[in-house]
Image (cartoon, rainbow, N blue to C red):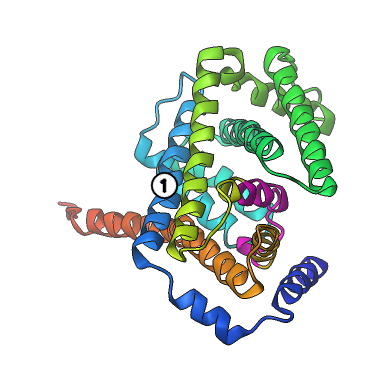
Amino acid sequence: MILVWVFAAGLFYLCLQSIDLDQAWSEFSRADPFWLLLAVFFNASILGVWAWLWYLLLPRKSSVSFARIFQANSFMSTSCNTIPFPGGHAVGVMALARRAKVGHTVALSVLALDQLMEGFAKIFVLTLVAIFVPLPDRMGQGILVFVVAICLFASIMFYFAHKKPGVREENGSLTGKVKAFVSRWSAHMDVLRDIRTFSSGLSLALLMMFAQTLGIWAVQKSLGLDLPWWSPILAMGALNLATVLPITPGNFGVYEGTAFLVYQFCGLGPESALSLALLQHLCFLIPMVGTGYLVLLFVSSIQKRSLSKEEWVVDET
């Protein structure tokens, strides 16, 4: 963990070298509030689509309200952008299992399917980057490695979904318990056995990527910069590669460093690139972190109100 923080700090330090911080602040402060609010709105809409994706990925026999799915999803979003990997994902599994009351195996299968859909959507974005953006050779190689990793993960998921091992626990051994857990886990992957539902889930994952790309575009518009039309797609693709594992809380340092390098590649000066990277991350974090806290406050107030309305009856003798 210390090495991770050192890496992020070093990357951010490289971005700050030879930068006029006063000029960077001047660029930062002249951003148009309308476009920034629009960027926050686009990023906030990701949570609604994401919660709907989770709702779709639940087994058909599950009966859970969308409100509880949204609560669990917002808690995971806040955790993933607050604590390092894999803490946020663990919180998401626990929140879905307990808040939505679907159990841990169902919650884990939903999270795995969610990552699979997101992986396919990222492949689509990276394909657009490879087609429309004049990329350096190293970035092209990085895209290829990412695509291979997602395809391997997808193959494993489809294998377990279509070849369900009917295994029972044997003598309480660790191997038997693991096999039984995998058996229960794969049994909940109905989505991968239904092409229509799978297509709907993939469409929602693509919609999430589109909303985030619109958020990047709106932040760019807020500074009125002259950027290539493909710059939001490149920024989205590069950030997908750099933040595939949230190694630092909120991807601080990694996000800014990646966006800074992308915008310098697009021809911006270091001050404009740094201001744009910071604004972009801020407009992303406000809804992705703040919504979970707002939901938590709302749920707590509802629970307190329900407790205050309870009628206590004295036992009669």
Pinpoint residue 191: horizontal percent, then vertical percent: 56, 20
> Magenta stretch mostly in which secondary structure?
helix
| Front in this rendered view, residue 198 or 165 | 198
**Residues shaded magenta:** 234-252
Crowdedness of circle 1 by 10 Å Cα count: few (<14), some, many (20+)?
Answer: many
Residue 102 appearing in the image? no
Q: Is residue 132 left or right of residue 303?
A: right
Q: Is residue 217 above or below residue 255?
A: above
Q: Relative to the observer, which residue lies in front, 129 or 115?
A: 129
Instruction: Reply yes or no: does residue 315 show up in magenta.
Output: no
Residue at (81%, 44%) from the top-left corner? 142
> What residue do we see at 56% from left, 68% from top?
278
> Whole-percent x and y of residue 129?
67, 40
Residue 8 placement (x, y as % from top left): 74, 68
Query: Left of 155 or right of it: where is 283?
Result: left
Taking the image as drawn, is residue 264 in sight? yes
How many numbered marks appear?
Answer: 1
- Taking the view exactly as shown, the residue that stands out farthest to the bottom is 22
Query: Residue 60: x and y, percent?
Result: 47, 19
Find out whether residue 235 is within the magenta segment: yes
For label 1, the residue is: 71
Secondary element type, mark 1: helix
Is 140 drawn above or below residue 191 in the view shown?
A: below
The vertical placement of 42 against 144, above or below, is below
Residue at position x 43%, y 70% from top? 31
Q: Residue at x 43, y 75 (%)?
A: 30
Of 154 and 222, nearer the camera is: 222
Q: Quadrant of the N terminus?
A: bottom right
